Amino acid sequence: MQQLKSRIEAVLFVTAKALSLNEIAAYVAAEPEEVEEAVLDLIMDYASRDGALEIDDEDGYILQVKEDYSDIVEKICPIDLSPAVLRTLSVIAIKKSIRQSELVKLRSNAYEHVAELVEKGLVSKSKDKNGRSINLKTTAKFREYFKLKGDLNALAKQLENGIDIDEKKDN
């Protein structure tokens, strides 16, 4: 069991996104049931260490720095966004929740930008009730990264009045 836990830990250490049990199982060549037991053990191990790392299991599993230590990580590894991606992110933030198809009408390069923003954890994707449309919205990591607190509705109104979201020329 310890060797499986170590292999899973290595996978979680190098991944940039949360992984499902099946994805982890494929990487470590083990059964999902075995992986689930080992991951739960790892979660408990990290929780009992009282260290700076934890395994988050909200949307899959990922090894991450605890929120208490995010200020240190930001100094070392800030999220780097191109101006074009930042403009796409600002549209999503202003709209609070926007269909990906609507975003593409506003920002022609949106598919590539959305993929980058989802990978960096600043935006989340979810299916609409009809199951066909994809909705986009900012995440807690977005608010944390930009140090946004208080009334986000007021901030969105201020931004909406000051940003031209129809710039389709940039990448």
Image: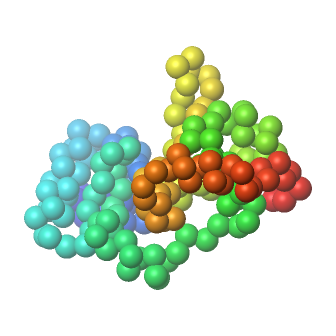
| Residue 156 percent across, percent down from the top left | 59, 49
Please tell me how many numbered marks the rendered image carries. Answer: 0
What's the residue at 62%, 41% (across, down)?
95
Choose top left, top right, bottom left or bottom right for residue 67: bottom left
| Residue 50 percent across, percent down from the top left | 14, 70
Question: Taking the image as drawn, is residue 2 in sight?
Answer: no
> Does residue 52 sit above or below 42 in this rendering?
below
| Residue 83 percent across, percent down from the top left | 73, 66
| Residue 140 percent across, percent down from the top left | 43, 53
> Does residue 118 sit above or below 70 in this rendering?
above
Whether residue 171 sits left or right of residue 144 in the image: it is: right
What's the residue at 28%, 58% (across, down)?
55
Question: Taking the image as drawn, is residue 8 in sight?
Answer: yes
What's the residue at 79%, 53% (across, down)?
164
Give whichever of 136, 34 is nearer the camera.
Answer: 136
> Does residue 50 sit above or below 94 in this rendering?
below
What's the residue at 43%, 59% (across, down)?
149
Q: Quadrant of the C terminus?
A: bottom right
Whether residue 88 sits left or right of residue 42 in the image: it is: right
Give whichever of 54, 40 is nearer the camera.
Answer: 54
